[in-house]
Image (cartoon, rainbow, N blue to C red):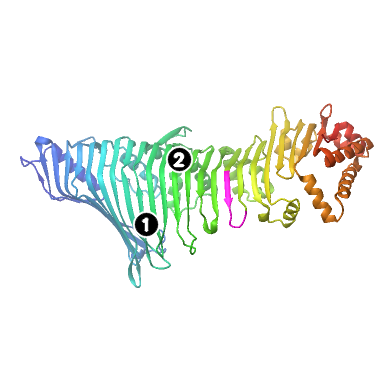
Amino acid sequence: MSGAILSPAGAQNSAEADYAAYIDRIEALGFETSNGGVRYEASADRLVIADDRLVLSGTFPLPEGEESNQATPEDELTYELVFTAGTTIIEGFDEENGTFSARNWSYSDDARLVIRAESAGQGRGQFEFRFIDTEITDYSFEVPALPAADPERPASRWLAFARAVLGSSYETTTIGAMALTMEAYETSPDGEQLVFSATGQMNGYRALNAAAGRVAEYGIDSIVQNTLTRNEATGEMLSQTTRYGETVYKDIDAMAIVDLFDPAIPETGERVTITGSQIARGYESRQDLGGGVALEIRGGESRVENIYVIKRDFDFLGLLDQLLRGEEPRVEDAIRGALQLYRSFGVDVALINDIAVSVPDIGGPDSGFSFEISEMGMTDIGPDGIGSLDIAGVNAPALPEGGSFSLNLASIGDIEFADYGPMSDMIDQLVNDPSFADKNPLAVARAFAPRSFGITVEGLDINLPGTDPIALDLYVLDLWTTVPPIPTAIELRTDNFTLPVSVIEDADARQVLEGLGLDTLTWSDETRIYWDEASQDLTLERIYVSVAGIGTLEGSLRFANVPRAALEDPQGQGQIALAMASFVDGEFRFVDDGLIESGLAFAAKDAGVPESVMTAAFIEQAVEATAFFQNEAFTEMTRDAATRFLKETGTLNISVKPANSIPLTQILGNLAAPQTLPDLLNLQISAE
């Protein structure tokens, strides 16, 4: 340490001695320190340090340097960190048992931190931070010793050091304003060229009530940043201006992160909050794209609630030590580490609203457009699943060539992940036997497949130039399973999906629909299927399909005694188990909404016959379909129902309601005597 210590009596008092001990600790970390003198003012119990300067410098190898026994300058990065302040004032400074404390610690408004880095022949960069109104109150901290060199533990040896640094405490840390400049240059045979530069200012930084790695509140009033980035294709420097409004974090626990990586801390399975809440108000960005055009993005308020961590039984630092030693970890350990790292974090809520994006004319004249998003967010993201990933209120009213797009809501959620234990075992199985997946795809899917999954889309409206709108009122798909990966509950619903027939790619389908006189296809459907493990009932509770201008089909089916084995191993023992199942009942109903009239007209025209002839032909086709049953009464029932359906009612009912449930094996056995099936199943066809 250089610089004089000046006291009224010419001798060091305790504050000066404690400060000297602090400097010794700082220098032991590798810093070079100097000052223009240290003066102790006894009346205020205050140290005043003039021209304070701390420097940390050195080199370390670049990861992509060529392997050789002798490092070259091109393989190394030289760095230097320099902190300076014209005046440092420390009030009530003390040291006890290696812990330093101060009632107040502040720097003059010329304080700055400069970080420089350079690689010979490649480039250099510099960051400079300038601080205004910097002050810390009720400050207590340690300056821990550097960990001993240990080639076997290049990462984990820093754990205790990190814990000690994070253990600092203070009542307030405030910075009135911080200005930033950054520059990065690339070195080439043609000389040095600027590739990136930035200026920025942060106002109103504050951190409140910190202790033992926990901070009650951290906030910033505003940030403005301007950057210039070189376009590699054109060499043009492209600018970006970004503004952030007030940002506040509350209830931060950095020590919980240290605990996560500390193998000495046992697994608890408990959620520990690392950020209680975060709220940011206002975001604006203008990115220059070259050629005088720019992309503009604006955001309203973003909010995060309860980011948490869960301690897992995995040595993350041990794996990192292994990588830093240049050793290749076992594949299963690397995969398990990545999976356990994901399972260690979660968040209850993360939302941002009032997003607006303006895209310029980058594809030619009138190619620009803008769109807005009312809200994007996610809820209950964690190790066990995903509550929801949502986007709401999307509106692009003026797309190129006269198109438009709007969406009320799109959501993916209700995702329950598979249990970790079977996944971990399957990882070992797949690594030890790579062919296992090909031989046992169902077992692999059972280990990894989610136990539930859901999709919702509401209020979709797409207008394409030259066509009628594509619209959707509602689409819902929910899947659950107690016998993964086979769904044991399915709920599917579509309300009013409207599509111009002209955009249907299947030429045959398009020709039929146009022949039925449909310019627009409007479709609704609903399906609900459940398997109940307790009762072993499999129920198609509802199937519903409605096409405007064609008709509506509704129905249901029930089966009993469907064992779990039928779902667990559908390609093996499940086929034998399924033979135990019984048919209970079923019914279907079709109500015409134009199919009879338009269908008969289309078919008659296509065949070149009168509609009356085509009607008779359809009735005979229905009758011929019953020939398999060899049951005259059933055939006549079908003839009567088909005739009344086509000529009178437009409604067709089919019911299969035996007096008692019938084993599937019995139904299959009666195929040898098909004339018995209509009576056995109480198969009825009618037209109301």
Residue 462 sits inside the magenta stretch: yes
Q: In percent of the image, x 45 and y 52: which residue is there?
A: 357
Is residue 248 shown above or below 235? above
Mark nearest the camera among 1 and 2 is 1
Q: Quadrant of residue 227?
A: bottom left
Q: Nearer the viewer, residue 300 or 592?
A: 592
Label 1 with label 2: CB-CB less than 8 Å: no
| Horizontal and vertical percent position of residue 465 | 58, 57
Q: Nearer the viewer, residue 661 or 139?
A: 661
Q: Quadrant of residue 140?
A: top left
| Horizontal and vertical percent position of residue 498 | 64, 47
Residue 214 in the figure: left or right of residue 306: left
| Horizontal and vertical percent position of residue 354 | 44, 44
Residue 492 sits inside the magenta stretch: no
Give the mark nearest the N terminus, 1 or 2.
Answer: 1
Residue 118 visible from this viewpoint: no
Quadrant into which the C terminus falls: top right
First to last magenta residue range:
459-467
**Label 1 sits on residue:** 240
Q: In percent of the image, x 58 and y 41: which residue is there?
A: 456
| Horizontal and vertical percent position of residue 6 | 9, 44
**Label 2 sits on residue:** 350
Q: Quadrant of residue 605?
A: bottom right
Mark 2: few/some/many CA within 10 Å (<14, 14-19, 20+): many
Residue 10 in the figure: left or right of residue 175: left
Is residue 617 shown above or below 230? above
The three-letter amino acid code for the residue at tag 1 is: Gln
Residue 336 visible from this viewpoint: yes
